[in-house]
Image (cartoon, helix red, strand yellow):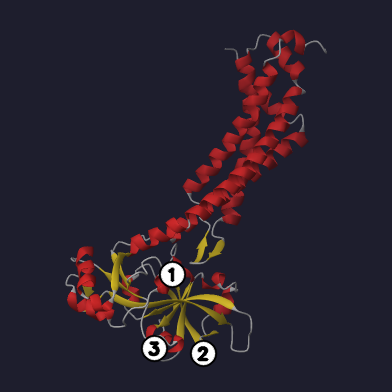
Amino acid sequence: MKKLPFDYGVRNLGRSPLRLLAIILGSTLVVLLMLTASAFVQGMRKSLSIQSQQENILLVSAGSEESIERSEINTSSGSFLAASVPGLKQRLEVSYVSPEIHVALIAYQSSRNTEELRALCRGITPTAFLVHPRVKIIAGRAPRAGYQEIIIGGLAADKMNLDTDQLALGKTLSFAKREWTIVGQFRAPATVMDAEIWVPLSDLQIATRRNGISCVVATLESAEFEDVDLFTKRRVDLELSAIRESDYYASLSKFYKPVQAMIWVTALLVSLAGILGGLNVMYAAFSARSREIGMLQALGFSRAAILLSLIQESLLATTSGTLIGLALSVFFLNGQSVRFSMGVFQLLIDPQVLLVGLIAGIGMGLLGAIPPAINCLRLPITETLKSI
């Protein structure tokens, strides 16, 4: 098959700068939409997944397996677990057992400020840093019980819609009718903990007037999940239920599947509109070149060779828009924070997401070129040359 020169299709792109600009802008928009949807889903999925090298088990109240916030158990449940189940992880005779309170509170920048801020608080003891190894203190220190001190997650400011410097070390927050001093900052990348405020457990119990706790997080070593599950069945008086931490967050991720599906559907519908717009542009562009296409056939170029050249033109234009969209997403979308009920997650532009954008751009180039090109090539040579 005799093919048209590669530079023939390249030169044709410059014949109509306005059309070329429309194709590039359209493909950029489609790619950005697909990248945003994919980054949203990827970021939410990562934040609700547990990627720890150790196996954590949650003890919650029976019937509250789907929501730690609704759970209320005995404060001594952690001590009972450590004493009853051998094989829990230990270091220097300290068991990896963390009693915790999970609660959403209304906070204020100060007692004089009336602007309500939605905060996620976790009551902790020092062992919380053992069972949650992804939490790393990056500034300051851990809070001390009895001094109304707190430590702030890296995305807590985004959750409360504040600037980062408003939650700097030494600043105060007001919640539960008390003033709390920020003494540290921590990061727990790609987890819901990164948007939380950690408070000493006893201080939070007093401030919220709670007698119990929300859950106990324990790390297994030689013990198995069945051992902890058996403990909950034996201690019927405690009304406990055991669940793997990974299973708990997997169920939360499943709960948000409809939201993720809605994001994909919205992106696909808008992208379809962009593709249809591209089809209209290509139909108009190729129809205006029917005489040129007829002349090329008269010169001995096959329909397949002409089709290949037209697809090449379309792919060159849409690939340019795709590369622009990929660059914009890396520089402006990656790491952007999105608030949701569980906290905050960041849009994640990783190789998998970039591949989705690349496929979307190439797909638009093919879908936008093949139907109008085939429509023009259907015409007999004599009919395309009539107007010459």
Q: Secondary structure at mark 3?
A: loop
Taking the image as shown, residue 199 lies to the left or right of residue 170, namely left
In the depicted view, which residue is nearer to us: 261 or 387? Answer: 261
Seen at 30% across and 61% down, the residue is: 53
- Residues under labels 1 and 3: Cα distance? 20 Å
Residue 35 locus on image (x, y percent)? 56, 48
Placement of 144 over or under 371, stated as above or below: below
- For marks 1 and 2 on the same chain, the one whose residue lies earlier in the sequence: 2
For mark 1, what is the residue?
193
Amino acid identity at mark 1: Met
Amino acid identity at mark 3: Ala
Which class describes the residues within 10 Å of circle 3: few (<14), some (14-19), or many (20+)?
some
For mark 2, what is the residue?
178
Q: Secondary structure at mark 1?
A: helix
Give the position of the C terminus as an image quadrant.
Answer: top right
- For marks 1 and 3 on the same chain, the one whose residue lies earlier in the sequence: 3
For mark 3, what is the residue?
145
Residue 215 locus on image (x, y percent)? 34, 75
In the depicted view, which residue is nearer to us: 28 or 124? Answer: 124
